[in-house]
Image (tube, helix red, strand yellow):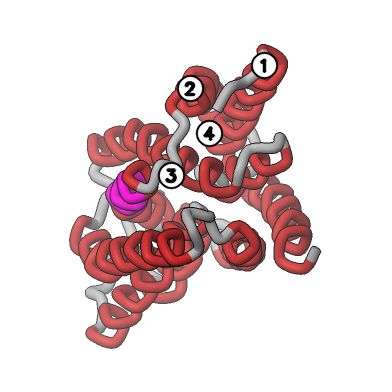
Amino acid sequence: MGYPGVDLLLYVLAGAGVGLIVGLTGVGGGSLMTPLLLLLGCPVGTAVGTDLVYASITKLSALVAHQRQGTVRWGVAFLLSSGSIPSALLSVWWLHQRMQTQGGGFPAHLVTSILGSGLILAAVGLLLRAFFCRGVNDELVEHGGTEDRIAPLSRLGIVVVGLVLGCLVTLSSVGAGACGTAALLVLCPRLPLVRIVGTELAHAVPLALVAGCGHLLLGNVDFLLLCCLSLASLPATQIGARIGRKMPDAVLQRILGCLLLGLGIRYAFF
């Protein structure tokens, strides 16, 4: 797929903009990047596949930072992955079978509808996160709050959430961050927010990598586009993280949530 110089510049700017927002809010990479790529004229399959590989790269550095700070609950991440990874593999297999029976065509209309639904879920999850986390988890972290052991029913719920996220992320690249975080807030209410973010990153990186490799085998990853996005987003993420320390997190989450909701309605119903 060839790109004029102007298009490449637009993709670089898109990567910088999304990277800045991810650095500011901690979520929104997949939720924003795929819609932006579609708006810039990128084919649906290429947008989803490239974004998944891009997400696995950009989120890995954030995961390393959280691991160094000891803010990852690997047991919870494993429960999520035990549902999401098999679901992602099955979704890749289903895409392969569908593309074979449809003469090699990517189910663009279906995926854009799923994308819209995923964006709406991500927006709702982000808005709920901003509502429920007003100082509660920060207070737990500040005062060394304890984390209750996860109940068996919650463990089952985490696996089920992983199953849903694996399918949703593989087909649309959307949902791991905002939806996964919102689900953990409900299922693990005593887990501090900083640990929820780190744990969700520990789940999102392998999920994006597995789904991205599946799309790579399907021919849906554009490496030139991937380089443009990563080149701009990696430094922008670091800049956004520095700015984000000085800005109210809840306000940023509400702004991003409203933006995602608007994009979701656009792709789900129009």
For the residue labelled by badge 4, is the local secondary structure a helix, a strand or a loop?
Answer: helix
Q: Nearer the viewer, mark 4 or mark 3?
A: 3
Most foreground residue, 165 or 251 = 165
Task: Name the residue tied to disc 3.
Answer: 52
Q: At which x and y percent is residue 154?
A: 31, 81
Is 75 covered by the magenta stretch?
no
Which percent across, then down, holds residue 185? 45, 68
Q: Which residue is mark 1?
A: 4
Element carrying mark 1: loop
Query: As rendered, which of 217 and 154 lies closer to the eye?
Result: 217
* N-term-proximal mark, 1 vs 4: 1
Distance between the alpha carbons at the discs numbered 3 and 1: 23 Å
Q: At x 37% / y 55%, what residue is drawn?
A: 200
Residue visible at 45% across and 70% down? 183
* SS at circle 3: helix
| Distance between the alpha carbons at the discs numbered 2 and 3 | 15 Å
| Residues packed near mark 1 inside 10 Å, few (<14), some (14 to 19) or many (20 plus) | few
Residue type at mark 3? Leu
Q: Which residues are magenta?
A: 204-214
Tell me the residue that label 4 is attached to.
23
Q: CA distance from mark 2 to mark 4?
A: 23 Å
Q: Which mark is residue 224?
A: 2
Of the residues shown, which amino acid type is indicated by label 4?
Gly
User: On the rendered structure, is 58 left or right of 113?
Assistant: left
